[in-house]
Image (cartoon, rainbow, N blue to C red):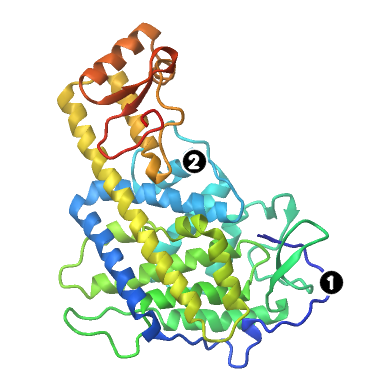
């Protein structure tokens, strides 16, 4: 999907969500959502339990991996591909971690997106106002352009022509949605901001039930995302900011849970990065994400179907994040084996590179498998030395080998990991 330049061509008049009598009072059938909400909370609890079990420092490293994946995903949903190393470097710096690669050159687009994500999650309890959202949007477009097009930044959109979301080739575009006209945006956003701040979950004392009628945190995050995307207040960047607001709502929900717990885990594990994998799941199911959002924006004030999709996506995101945590635990165990095996500095460098690549099941894996030539380049050594190092790692059970001659490939020997070189 892409945003069309403003057009003066009038549209047919479908009734969009914001045109419904009673907007913006959205309705949700919480009974119909009960099972999905329970399942989502179970998966959230499993993820938090895994993070609690591994300790502060490994959890920070995992937070980096999750944050990097979320940053790449939220940009890619909009068709923007960010440089992986630039994102890793930016995130590592914010978490106080040493990056394990060569520091990437500063990228203003990357820094801006990571700034927005950090502000949304780390400062989740700070009030939201128009200026804060304007600064977020400005950070995403530091040059005041989207591609080569000049766009309005640092304020609500103000063009007179309709804001339309379309797909399809030029001349045969399909209009999926038309947002409220620009002159309505200030009032629409004032209502949204007032609601978002007024419904921020407050902490409850341990053992004391939440106040009757308090909006479920997952439901609130779903409503916030839908409401913001329906208003579509900016000329560009609405998707990334809308997902940041959803992450903020989820972080607020978790903050309230922790503050209301008698023995809450260390907050720094929770608030430094988005950990629930929403953007990754939305990217993986991008068509379903757009379909669910579009159906809600063309429907009635009863948005139960959208909230159900969002809650189920949250649960799946938590499951995916659990896999990332388990992979980190696998890495820690493998590093302990490395130390016990007495590997040299060259071997450590290459093994760390293979661990960074990860497993195929999580979208990773060392592309094409490790070869002697690749080892030579990664370790900065000669071919005979590379051959000896590789044979030594195989003997020590740290690498798996397959193929023969020029087809010989090596893969890291982590139980449960699938690598391209090992079928």
Residue 193 is tagged as: none
213 or 167, nearer to the observer: 167
Residue 317 x/y as whole percent:
39, 60
For mark 2, give the secondary structure. Answer: helix
Q: Is 167 left, or right, of 323 in this rendering? A: right
State which quadrant residue 378 falls in.
Answer: top left
Residue at 58% across, 92% down: 22
Residue 334 x/y as whole percent:
23, 34
> Does the residue at mark 1 contact the one at mark 2 (Cβ under 8 Å)?
no
Residue 47 x/y as whole percent:
28, 59
Tell me the distance, in whole angstroms, between the alpha carbons under discs 1 and 2: 39 Å
127 or 6, nearer to the observer: 6
Which residue lies under the disc numbered 2? 84
Which residue lies under the disc numbered 1? 8
For mark 1, give the secondary structure. Answer: loop
Residue at 28% across, 20% down: 345
């Amino acid at each position: 999907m892409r945003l069309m330049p403003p057009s003066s061509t009038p549209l047919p008049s479908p009734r969009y969500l914001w045109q419904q009598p009673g907007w913006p009072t959205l309705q949700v059938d919480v009974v119909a959502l009960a099972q999905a909400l329970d399942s989502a909370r179970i998966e959230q609890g499993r993820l938090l339990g895994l993070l609690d079990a591994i300790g502060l420092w490994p959890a920070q490293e995992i937070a980096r991996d999750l944050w990097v994946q979320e940053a790449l995903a939220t940009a890619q949903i909009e068709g923007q591909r960010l440089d992986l190393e630039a994102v890793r470097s930016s995130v590592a710096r914010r978490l106080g971690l040493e990056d394990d690669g060569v520091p990437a050159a500063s990228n203003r687009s990357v820094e801006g997106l990571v700034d927005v994500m950090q502000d949304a999650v780390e400062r989740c309890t700070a009030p939201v106002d128009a200026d804060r959202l304007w600064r977020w949007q400005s950070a995403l477009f530091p040059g005041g352009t989207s591609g080569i097009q000049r766009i309005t930044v640092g304020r609500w959109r103000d063009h007179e022509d309709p804001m339309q979301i379309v797909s399809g080739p030029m001349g045969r575009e399909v209009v999926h949605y038309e947002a409220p006209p620009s002159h309505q945006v200030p009032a629409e956003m004032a209502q949204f901001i007032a609601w978002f701040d007024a419904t921020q979950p407050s902490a409850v004392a341990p053992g004391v039930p939440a106040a009757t009628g308090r909006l479920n945190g997952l439901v609130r995050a779903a409503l916030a995302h839908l409401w913001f995307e329906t208003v579509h207040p900016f000329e560009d960047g609405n998707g990334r900011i809308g997902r940041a607001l959803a992450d903020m709502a989820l972080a607020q929900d978790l903050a309230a849970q922790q503050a209301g717990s008698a023995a809450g885990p260390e907050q720094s594990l929770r608030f430094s990065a988005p950990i629930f994998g929403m953007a990754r799941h939305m990217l993986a199911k991008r068509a379903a994400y757009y379909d669910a959002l579009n159906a809600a924006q063309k429907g009635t004030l009863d948005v139960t179907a959208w909230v159900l999709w969002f809650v189920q996506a949250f649960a799946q995101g938590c499951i995916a994040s659990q896999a990332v945590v388990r992979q980190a635990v696998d890495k820690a165990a493998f590093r302990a084996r490395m130390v016990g095996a007495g590997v040299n500095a060259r071997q450590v460098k290459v093994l760390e590179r293979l661990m960074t690549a990860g497993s195929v099941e999580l979208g990773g894996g060392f592309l094409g498998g490790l070869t002697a030539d690749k080892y030579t380049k990664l370790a900065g050594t000669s071919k005979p030395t590379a051959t000896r190092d590789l044979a030594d790692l195989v003997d020590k059970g740290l690498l798996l080998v397959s193929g023969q001659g020029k087809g010989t490939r090596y893969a890291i020997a982590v139980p449960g990991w699938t690598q391209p070189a090992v079928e």
